Image: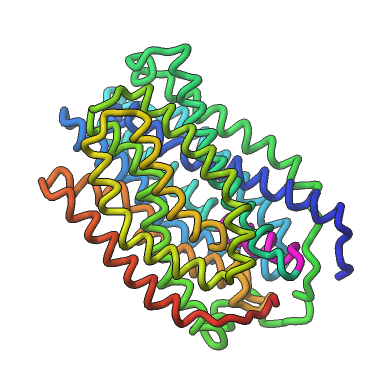
Amino acid sequence: MKELTKMQKIRSIIAASSGNLVEWFDFYIYAFSAIYFAHSFSHSDNEIVQQISAFGVFAAGFLMRPIGSWIFGSLADKVGRKKSMVTSVILMALGSFIIAALPSKESVGDVAIFLLLVARLIQGLSVGGEYGIAATYLSELASKGKRGFYSSFQYVTLIGGQLLAVASISIMLLFFSEEEMKDYAWRILFVVGGILALGSLFVRNIMNESATKLHEHSDRGTLKTLLSFSWKPFLLVVGITAGGSLAFYTITTYTKTFIMNAHLIDNTLSNNIYLIALFVLMIIQPLFGLLGDKIGHKNSILIFSVLGFLGIYPIFAALKVSANPYVVLTLVLALFVILSFYTSVAGIFKAKLFPEHIRALGTGLGYAIPNAIFGGSAPFVALWFKNAGCENGFFIYVAILMVVVLLIAFCLPKQSELE
């Protein structure tokens, strides 16, 4: 396929990234609004148990990610990245509209939580395919020596989706009280998400296909090819993603719940603090991507694992007793700096381990399996530890996974297929 011009690359990166942003907004609005709708689907009167039920469904949505990455990754390797990305965003819109229209436990009893689960499984299927394809597409558009910088925009938009999710809640709280949010207003967020997802279809239609030679490989996009010829890099991706996903969802998703459950600052202020912190996290991704291009993507992963092991536990311990909003913001930003050594190069270090004819499948599936096990379960497991009276046990669990990342990162090659 003919090499794309610079303008075509820029247009395609913007189109892919904007669609990615909308998909992640739809996916994360659940996590950040769960505190408002959890009571609608759980019969327990205990707030923590209600949240455990809601985040249990959040975790279950991640179980569909491996299936989504298999289906959409295989499709992307067989017919092209663009078609697969367009299809995945349609599923995300469907899941959002279903959640917006769900009946509560008062109307249908225990069926309510089952219907919520079905909607999340649909969204999990969608976003499971999105990650691997986006990482593959951006890595193939990037020029040599700037791959970390370009691929960092995947997490710019991924974090941007989280940022919009938090911002939308802040905006909603300007017009609705907390009681109204818990009663009905939370549904508006999912309606908006579904509409935005459908709107992103137009944007993705202007994308150019990346310059690959997929048609030259008759065995492209199959599990047999992946496991026969690239099982070693696949295991490397699985191992590092296990710790990386746990850290990502602990830091970007559970931290907000952790702060709110501490009850040292009010919910509106904690939401605004998190809004500022997520904005900073988003804009520093390209800077850390450039740093990764300079020092090496492998070294970025090594730094992340060491800082994560040494820093995550004590920072959360400090957050638990901090009532000063400026201190809380500083501590959250410290967590985000640690995380950025991983997120800025996560997509590229995975994609560059695989040849192009199994790149989307290998990247997506290698991400989705550990993400389903360790990432999506992070808030659920953290709340389970809290409810059991041994909250610190969760952070010991995180530290152990950081050691695993460190050991596996030493096995990463310096050169790659893309280079």
Q: To which quarter of the image does residue 209 belong?
A: bottom right
Position of the N terminus, as image quadrant, is bottom right
Residue at 34 percent across and 72 percent down: it is: 404
Q: How is the image coloured?
A: rainbow
Q: Is residue 163 left or right of residue 418?
A: left
Q: Which residues are magenta?
A: 129-143
Q: Is residue 372 left or right of residue 293?
A: left
Is 10 above or below relative to 243?
above
Q: To which quarter of the image does residue 253 belong?
A: top left
Q: Is residue 217 left or right of residue 305?
A: right
Q: Is residue 11 left or right of residue 301?
A: right
Residue at 58 percent across and 69 percent down: it is: 295
Q: Which secondary structure class fits the magenta region best? A: helix
Residue at 32 percent across and 62 percent down: it is: 309
Q: Position of residue 29 (x, y in %)?
A: 46, 35
Is residue 141 visible in the rendered image? The answer is: yes
Q: Position of residue 392 (x, y in %)?
A: 18, 51
Is residue 95 visible in the rendered image? The answer is: no
Identify the residue at the far left of this view.
389
Number of dots carrying numbers:
0
Identify the residue at the far bottom of this view.
228
Is 237 above or below relative to 115?
below
Q: Position of residue 286 (x, y in %)?
A: 63, 52
Residue at 70 percent across and 77 percent down: it is: 419
Is 277 above or below relative to 406?
above
In front here: 243 or 33? Answer: 243
Q: Position of residue 387 (x, y in %)?
A: 15, 43
